[in-house]
Image: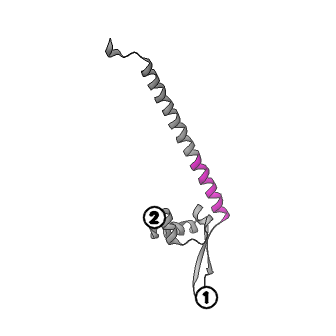
Amino acid sequence: MRLIEANPDISQRKLARELGISLGGVNYCLNALIEKGLVKMERFRVSENKLAYVYVLTPRGASEKAMLTRGFLARKMDEYELLRAEIESIRQELSADAARPDERLS
């Protein structure tokens, strides 16, 4: 949805390339977003004989994107805090091991 919002005239082929998924996958996802009312598709003339499409986030789509972004950031912050706590625990464990005399020398 970020790519569509930033580049409303992006082609499905370019979306597929940018996202690393198949053209059919992009088409399927875009149709699902359109069906849910999150994206709308509008035609516009590129030249005299050719029509192209523009993909626009609807207000509902923009709201959904913001909600998904908040959820993503919350999950990433939780992961970060867990990793930070695990790293700190390992550091403390290593410090405690380094402070103990080597039992093999006794």
Residue that appears at 62% across and 58% down = 64
Residue that appears at 58% across and 79% down = 52
Percent coordinates x, y for residue 8 in the rendering:
61, 69
State whether residue 47 appears in this view.
yes
Q: How many labels does the image show?
A: 2
Question: Which region of the structure is painted magenta?
Answer: 58-73
Taking depth in this image into account, of 95 and 19 the one nearest to the observer is 95
Q: What element carries label 2?
A: loop
Q: In which quarter of the image is the N terminus?
A: bottom right
Please identify the quarter of the rendering in which residue 44 is found: bottom right
Sort mark 2 into few (<14), some (14-19) or many (20+) by Cα contacts within 10 Å.
Answer: few
Look at the picture and state if 43 lies above or below 70.
below
Q: Does the magenta stretch include residue 71?
A: yes
Real-space CA distance between mark 1 and mark 2, rounded to the nearest whole angstrom: 32 Å
Return the mark for residue 94: none
Percent coordinates x, y for residue 75 in the rendering:
55, 45
Look at the picture and state if 23 lies above or below 87.
below
Return the mark for residue 48: 1
Q: Is mark 1 on a helix, strand or loop?
A: loop
* Residue indicated by mark 2: 21
Sort mark 1 into few (<14), some (14-19) or many (20+) by Cα contacts within 10 Å.
Answer: few
Taking depth in this image into account, of 76 and 33 the one nearest to the observer is 76
Q: Quadrant of the C terminus?
A: top left
